Amino acid sequence: VAMLGALSGGGISLAAFLYRYGSRSFSEKIRQAIEGGRLTLVYQPLVRIHDRQMVGVEALARLTDEYGEDIAPDVFIKVAEEGGFIDRVARIVIRTALKEMRSRLKATAGFHCGINLSTGDILDETLCDFLDREVKSHGLEPSQVVLEVTERATADPEQLIGSMEKFRQRGYAFYLDDFGTGYSNLAYLAHLPISGIKLDRMFTQAIGKEAMGSTIAENVCAVAKALNLQLIVEGIETEEQAQYIDRLSPAAIGQGWLYGRPVPAEKLRK
Ligand code: C2E
Ligand code: CA
Ligand code: CA
Ligand code: CA
């Protein structure tokens, strides 16, 4: 009745009403799925291109609704960010990833687990302590966790860099995710406390097809080298793409269907 009253009062259009209340219940549905234990993780191998050695994994979140239907990660992550409960996602992901990857992280020297963080997570004052507690409780080292952060700077750069420094001081490394799709310039890049850049798959997929794609890949390889950053190339699907990157940057790490799709922990190859 109150809703109808709001409608007839003329304060809100029907479209706005549906948008607001429709999206609120969608957001509520996603929150419930997360709290109800329907957030799981899959892992995708990170492979040294030159010798195909698996050097780590990236944890990727999956969510299903009450009917078992998948909700796309790009969708529920955005909804969680906008709904103010991305902190719950981050904590569940950290806890689950460390638990599921513990034995692998312990068994293989230098092996690391990548975890995606939203800007809000990095600015979250309490997340670093949470992460520290989880890492210690599993007998792991901070250096075994790499935090992936995108360059879509929705936050004040100074503030973001300050928060990243805090994680860094405790031994966590950052990779700049989806590199090339944002707008960070070289001066900004040089100031970010990161140890690697992940070339977005958009550019990888243009290798051998569009002159532009190859040019960008070449330039990003050069930038990584000049700034002494680890290069990770996303979305490698073909042998041709892998060989192209290997010629440009023999130390590059690759990720993509050529090496393995994201799979549950127990299906990850040895
Ligand atoms: P991302 O971090 O860039 O993750 C890489 C995406 O590329 C993944 O999509 C992965 O499945 C896909 N991919 C990997 N290799 C290939 C390939 O060879 N070809 C193609 N076509 N695609 C490939 P996914 O799992 O759908 O994740 C989408 C995005 O959702 C991620 O992009 C990340 O930004 C976000 N996300 C996932 N998990 C989390 C999380 O735990 N926290 C936060 N904040 N964001 C997350
Ligand atoms: Ca990522
Ligand atoms: Ca990415
Ligand atoms: Ca992405």
Image (spheres, rainbow, N blue to C red):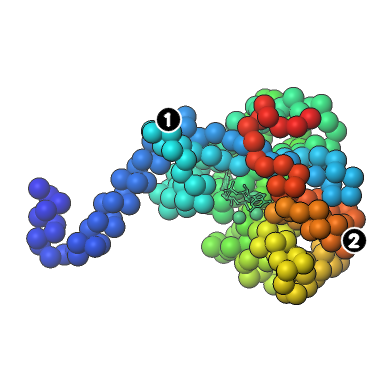
As rendered, which of 17 and 171 lies closer to the eye?
17
| Residue 64, position as x, y percentages in the image | 46, 37
Q: Is residue 122 above or below residue 151?
A: above
Amino acid, disc 2: Arg
Asked if the residue at tag 2 contacts the one at tag 1, i.e. Cβ–Cβ closer than 8 Å, the answer is no
Q: Mark 2 points at which residue?
A: 247
Q: Mark 1 and mark 2: span between their CA atoms?
A: 47 Å
Would you say residue 23 is visible in this rendering? yes
Q: In this view, does 145 lie above or below 229?
A: above
Q: Mark 1 points at which residue?
A: 36
Q: Residue visible at 37% across and 46% down?
A: 27
**Left or right of residue 49: residue 202:** left
| Residue 211, position as x, y percentages in the image | 75, 75
Q: Is residue 77 above or below residue 160?
A: above
User: In terms of secondary structure, where does tag 1 sit?
Assistant: loop
Question: Which of the 4 quarters of the picture holds residue 161?
Answer: bottom right
| Residue 265, position as x, y percentages in the image | 66, 30
User: In terms of secondary structure, where does tag 2 sit?
Assistant: helix
Q: Residue visible at 70% across and 61% down?
A: 205
Would you say residue 170 is visible in this rendering? no
Q: In which quarter of the image is the C terminus?
A: top right
**Left or right of residue 157: residue 67:** left
